[in-house]
Image (tube, rainbow, N blue to C red):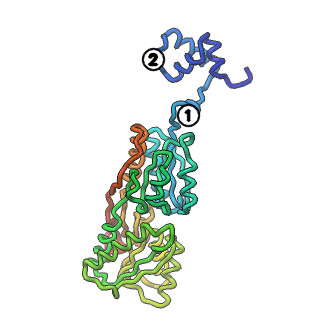
Amino acid sequence: MGRPATMRDVAKRARVSQRTVSNVVNNYVHVSPDTRQRVLDAIEELGYRPNVAAQSLRAGRTKIIALAVPNISWPYFGEIAHLVQAEAERRGFTLVVAETEGALEKELQVLKGFNANLIDGLILSSIELGEEDIRQLGAPIPLVLIGERISGAGRPHFQIDGYRAGRELTRHVYDQGARTFLFVGSTTTTMTEGPGQERLGGFLAGLAALGVTSDAWTSIDCQWTYKGGFRALRSWLGQHRPPDAILCMNDIVASGVMRALADAGYRVPADVLVAGWDDTREAKYLIPSLTTIAPDKEEIARLAVQSLAEMLQSGRHQGSDNLVSHRLRVRESTVRDAGRN
């Protein structure tokens, strides 16, 4: 015919209606065996290929879901995206990933720009949007939240207990002999304010419970990047000797801190203990390997996709806040003469 075969062509060849062809393609049971075979023969003879996208739209489902994160280049979010992709594929969904840069306008664009004609639902790691924003917007699609920014928004939400994890990390380095402390990582920038405040709050609560006074610790701000950690500590070391322990707001800040210490001639952990947060893949392979807080990323991804699938099945868009487990992974950077883990 010089063009792709259409449903009309198949119907004409099989001497049936287009509705009957559609019923056969969608495997409806109320088609006689003889009619079904005539349609299947016509499909094979003409090389007809159904438009799967159009079928999905007519069915009210695209089988496509979206994940929106602040920065896909951060190892933590890259790993989350990989795990969400695997879980989505296991459940028969296709995943698209959007980057918001932690900016309010981009988060709003993602939330309002997607609609049911494009995706079935959205998993969002928000930086700027708050619970009141979500409630007022009334998200037009099923929405699942991950991360430490939003709680109480009436949507399924999964995060670790960052406050408790901060206390656990502080207690660990204290038990290793640390009595002076430096916290590295901004808690005031837009992208890091929510999780930064919770983690710092946990650190300080841990020190208070141990009887450590405020003159035994200090904090310095930086962007949560390799360069941010490196530059912040290099500048700080220009006027100070390192404390007993440096606790960093994430693993990439800790990597920059460890490089600054090495450049200044200090050894980890012999001279100073260093810890991070997120348990990214590189943490295990740094020299020395990095002690860090390990969120159960696999569980976050599994529960986020599962919740989205359940919302699609039930039609209900409500949910609650849920804590996911975490571990303190103790490695060489905080244990003198430590074995590898």
Give the residue at the far right of this rendering: 2
The residue positioned farthest toward the front in the image shown = 136
Sequence-earlier tag: 2 or 1: 2
**Number of disc labels:** 2
Could you tell me residue 223's position as x and y percent? 51, 73
Question: How packed is label 1: few (under 14 Cα within 10 Å), some, or many (20 or more)?
Answer: some
Q: Which mark is residue 57?
A: 1
Quadrant location, the N terminus: top right
Quadrant position of residue 6: top right
Q: Residues within 10 Å of mark 2 (few under 14, many from 20)?
A: few
Please tell me whether residue 311 is drawn above or below residue 224 in the rendered image. above
Q: Is residue 319 left or right of residue 57?
A: left
Residue located at (51% from left, 85% from top): 235
> The C terminus appears in which quarter of the rendering?
bottom left
Mark 2 vs 1: CB contact within 8 A: no
Is residue 8 toward the left or the right of residue 71 in the image?
Answer: right
Q: Tell me how far mark 2 sits from mark 1, CA to CA.
A: 21 Å
SS at circle 2: loop
Mark number displayed over residue 29 = 2
